Amino acid sequence: MMFESAQGMKIVVRTNGPYIVSGGVPLARGEIVVNDAGESVAWREIERVPTGETYALCRCGKSGNKPLCDGSHFADGFDGTETAERAPYTEQASCTNGPGLKLLDARQLCAEARFCDRAGGLWNLINRCDEPGVSDLADEEAALCPSGRYVTCDAVTGEPHEPALEPSIWLIEDPSLGVSGALWVRGGIPIVSEDGTPYEVRNRVTLCRCGESKNKPFCDGSHIAAVFDGR
């Protein structure tokens, strides 16, 4: 599912090294907001992080100057081999057709942000979209998913319901679990593999920054078990 690229911005994955970010991409720290029941319901921007036009973000999780790379991947012997599927999102995703809305779901992209858990789960809501308010809630839950695992689309036209996001990178913090999460790449910033092959440009992508993902360069939620601290 192609998305218009952010003009002049780019992220390049270095072999067993950092992400090289160019084009003046804004960098911010943001956190997952939960309700009284502990469910993820919103995002809150905490701060803007000063950067230059080009900067290197840690990918191994061991930098002493997080979020920036300090060369720790050399001493750590970091293996950053990219193992993620290269096929377009629509080829990776399963599809559930609900009343007036369909849900695409690429499970392997899950960053464990848990926005899909409310009201019985997005996977159940999609089948109840003919009930009052359910379609809007399904759209909301899918749009809050940082990894783009979920995309809701019009059942007739197939038009995706994507949120408008500023081209930027967010350093995700997950205070309810006490961990730091992925790098949330927003607004269609191109990502280029270490071998020079571009990944599909998407509106929402999460990149691993703890070094533990089994789906590199993308996040697979391993930061939770690793109790990763990215501050």
Image (tube, helix red, strand yellow):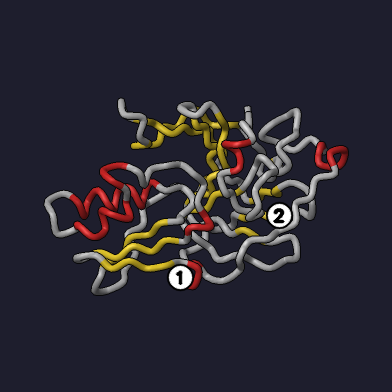
- Helix, strand or loop under label 2: strand
Which residue is depicted at the point 65% across and 42% down?
Answer: 209
The answer to which image quadrant residue 42 occupies is top left
Pointer 2 local density, CA inside 10 Å: few below 14, some 14–19, many at least 20: many
Gap between marks 1 and 2, in whole Å?
A: 23 Å
What residue is rendered at 81% in x and 41% in y?
73
- Identify the mark at residue 13; answer none if there is no mark: 2
Left or right of residue 58: residue 15: right
**Residue found 14% across the figure and 59% down from its top:** 130
Say if 153 sits above or below 11 in the image: below
Mark 1, Cα crowd under 10 Å, few <14 / some 14-19 / many 20+, is some
Q: Confirm whether residue 6 shows in the render.
A: no
View extreme (left): residue: 132
Name the residue type under label 2: Val
Q: Position of residue 197 (x, y in %)?
A: 68, 68
Name the quadrant of the N terminus.
bottom left
**In terms of secondary structure, where does tag 1 sit?**
helix
Q: Which sits earlier in the primary sequence, circle 1 or circle 2?
A: 2
Q: Nearer the viewer, mark 1 or mark 2?
A: 1
Q: Is residue 52 visible?
A: yes
Residue at x 63% of width, y 46% of height: 208
> Which numbered tag is attached to residue 90?
1
Query: Seen in the image, is 123 located left or right of residue 2?
Result: left
The amino acid type of the residue labelled 1 equals Thr
Instruction: In the rendered structure, find residue 146 and report the number of the disc placed on it.
Output: none
Q: Is residue 197 above or below residue 82?
A: below
Residue 37 percent coordinates (x, y): 31, 29
